[in-house]
Amino acid sequence: MSGGREPRDVVRFATALIATASLVLLKVLGAWAGHSLALGADAAHSLGDVGALGLAWYADRQRNRPPTDVLTFGWGRVEILVGLLNALVLWALAGALGWAAVRQWSHPTAANAEIMALAAGVALVVNGVLAWNFRESEDLNRRSTWWHLMTDAAGSLGVLVGASILAATGWRPINAVVTLAIVLLMIWGPWSIIRDTFRILLEATPAKVPLADIAAKMQAVPGVARVHDLHVWAVGSQQWALACHIELAALPPSAQTVLCDLHDCLAGFGFDHTTIQLETSAEAHPEPGW
């Protein structure tokens, strides 16, 4: 992340934190005054978002720290760990709210539809605006933040719909129904984040990396006889690394020429960090099992 983007990111995270904390207070007061479990569930969800946004902001700042003798790849995976933690927090909140919704279904209480609608309407607009600021990001940390804000907005929409049904029909269990809908959204939303973080932690080849095409283009570089022991992994959501062995067809006038051609080839795939070992067919060494 360049220095030009950093002030804008600070403003985005700070705005989201302050606005979400204010919404928690609004929803808590609305849930208390309106006797609404659904609005209380939405407040609990927003409270989780406050912690998640704080962690996301912290991770966003940490990944720009320089590498150290211990963390030679830098701090890029802080965002991965925070993204995973944020997603798991959402699942934990979903479990607690689901249990509360089941109990509410058995003993529904009267709720004030007008207060529910007012608090949810304000929250829906605010969360929609905040989520828009984090849209279309490939960054795992920002994607996690976007999901938190979007599920919060969807929860507010559910409360608004529930308030409308309650006002029109007087059907009390609607609070439990809306809460369960929010719970399902909180379970479904983080799944892609959890899947991607596990892929990175297991050092799987990034989904967008065409490994076979990369090997073929490297093989086509003049002077290259064979590409083997090829590994591609993600250090962070936007940081890819590559390591491989290159067997030279014959020792060229300058092995550096082959290396430069290979780096140019890999730059087209988005790699800015590669480790390439050049060797000839006379070099004999055992292939690793990984």
Image: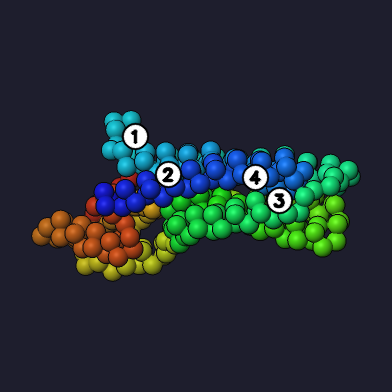
Taking the spot 56% from the left edge, 50% from the top edge, the residue there is 148
Of the image marks 2 and 1, the number of the one nearer the N terminus: 2
**CA–CA distance in space, label 4 to label 1:** 42 Å
Q: How far apart are marks 2 and 3 (CA)?
A: 28 Å
Task: Say which label, 3 or 1, has the lower sequence index.
Answer: 1
The tag on residue 63 is none
The kind of residue tagged 4 is: Lys
- Quadrant location of residue 67? top left
Q: Name the residue under label 1.
A: 71
Residue type (three-letter) at the residue carrying disc 3 = Ile
10 Å crowding of disc 3: few (<14), some (14-19), many (20+): many
Give the class, few, some or many, for how many residues have Cα within 10 Å of label 1's Cα (few <14, many ≥20). few
Q: Which numbered mark, 2 or 1, is in the foreground of this view?
A: 2
Q: Position of residue 196 (x, y in %)?
A: 52, 51
In whole angstroms, how far apart are the C-alphas of marks 3 and 1? 51 Å
Cα–Cα gap, marks 2 and 4: 20 Å
| Res 118 → quadrant | bottom right
Residue 136 in which image quadrant: bottom left
Residue at the (28%, 38%) spot, across then down:
66
Which comes before the other along the chain, label 4 or label 3? Answer: 4
- Count of marks, rendered view: 4
Q: Mark 3 points at which residue?
A: 115
Mark 3 residue element: helix
Query: Of the residues tagged 4 and 3, which is closer to the observer?
Result: 3
Colour scheme of the picture:
rainbow
Disc 4 marks which residue?
A: 27
Checking the image for residue 14, the label placed there is 2
Cα distance in 3D space between marks 4 and 3: 10 Å
How far across and down, in percent of the image, does residue 38 sit? Answer: 73, 48
Residue 209 visible to an observer of this rendering: yes
